[in-house]
Image (cartoon, rainbow, N blue to C red):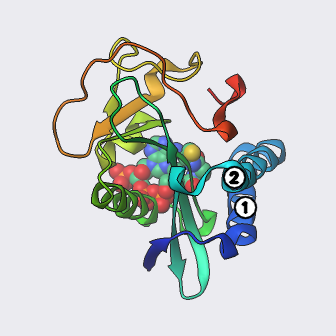
Amino acid sequence: MEFSLFESTATDEVVELFTRVFSASEGAAEGQSIGFLVSSLITTTPADSLIGCVAKDGTRIVGAIFFSRLKVPSGQRAFLLSPVAVATEVHGTGIGQALITFGLDQLRSQGTDLVFTYGDPAFYSKTGFAQIDESIVAAPYPLSQPIGWLGQSLDGSPIPAMRGVTECVEAFANPDHW
Ligand SMILES: CC(C)(COP(=O)(O)OP(=O)(O)OC[C@H]1O[C@@H](n2cnc3c(N)ncnc32)[C@H](O)[C@@H]1OP(=O)(O)O)[C@@H](O)C(=O)NCCC(=O)NCCS
């Protein structure tokens, strides 16, 4: 398995991967919706605010993740990890965790301080994420499942409590995603 940064020439393959994986796990409508989200993330996010990573088995992309800029009140460099997909037929073989670890290393080498995500704590805790109370860092929109608001500091220091508004990129600027 080879891990590398996403390049825009792989857009169609990656959108198709997300659509297929989420259609299989959550149904066709959710698959279409995530495919649209990924397409919009790639086309509307400024280059310095989006980092994608892919896992390749030979020439075929079998996993993909995106990190997009999150403006936090402390002014620290922060990104949001979302979404994540691994090809259904290779679930449970360690690709998801390895891809996230690769992505976090990329972000760390670029001087990123904090990474957040919104998802299942049981899965994301395997790559260093822990639940955050919204009194420490608010999410950009009201959360339907506050238990899924997660974060980590890439230098190992605790995430400082910060007051004020957190801002996501345009593709996530929709309360339905939260
Ligand atoms: C979630 C997903 C990315 C995990 O990737 P993966 O390559 O299968 O995961 P890994 O093999 O690296 O890790 C497997 C571990 O995570 C756990 N895990 C996997 N998916 C999980 C989920 N949805 N919830 C909780 N735990 C999960 C497994 O139980 C396993 O635990 P173990 O190591 O203790 O046995 C993949 O299953 C996927 O694409 N799912 C559909 C899309 C999705 O739900 N994406 C995440 C939300 S954006």
Near-viewer residue (102 or 106): 106
Residue tagged 2: 38
Q: Is residue 171 left or right of residue 164?
A: right
Near-viewer residue (69 or 37): 69
Label 1, secondary structure: give it.
helix
Residue sitting at 83 percent across and 43 percent down?
29
Residue sitting at 25 percent across and 29 percent down?
159
Q: Is residue 45 left or right of residue 127?
A: right
**Please, which residue is most extreme toward the bottom here?**
58
Q: What's the CA distance linking mark 1 and mark 2?
A: 6 Å
User: Which amino acid type is marked by label 2?
Assistant: Val
Q: Is residue 59 above or below residue 126?
A: below
Residue sitting at 74 percent across and 49 percent down?
40
Label 2, secondary structure: give it.
helix
Q: Quadrant of the C terminus?
A: top right
Q: Check if mark 1's residue and mark 2's residue have beta carbons within 8 Å.
A: yes
Q: Quadrant of residue 140?
A: top right
**Which of the two labelled residues, at mark 1 and mark 2, occupies the earlier sequence position?**
1
Q: Residues within 10 Å of mark 2 (few under 14, many from 20)?
A: many
Q: Looking at the picture, how far across and down is residue 32, in whole percent?
A: 81, 49
Identify the disc placed on residue 15: 1
Q: Residues within 10 Å of mark 1 (few under 14, many from 20)?
A: many
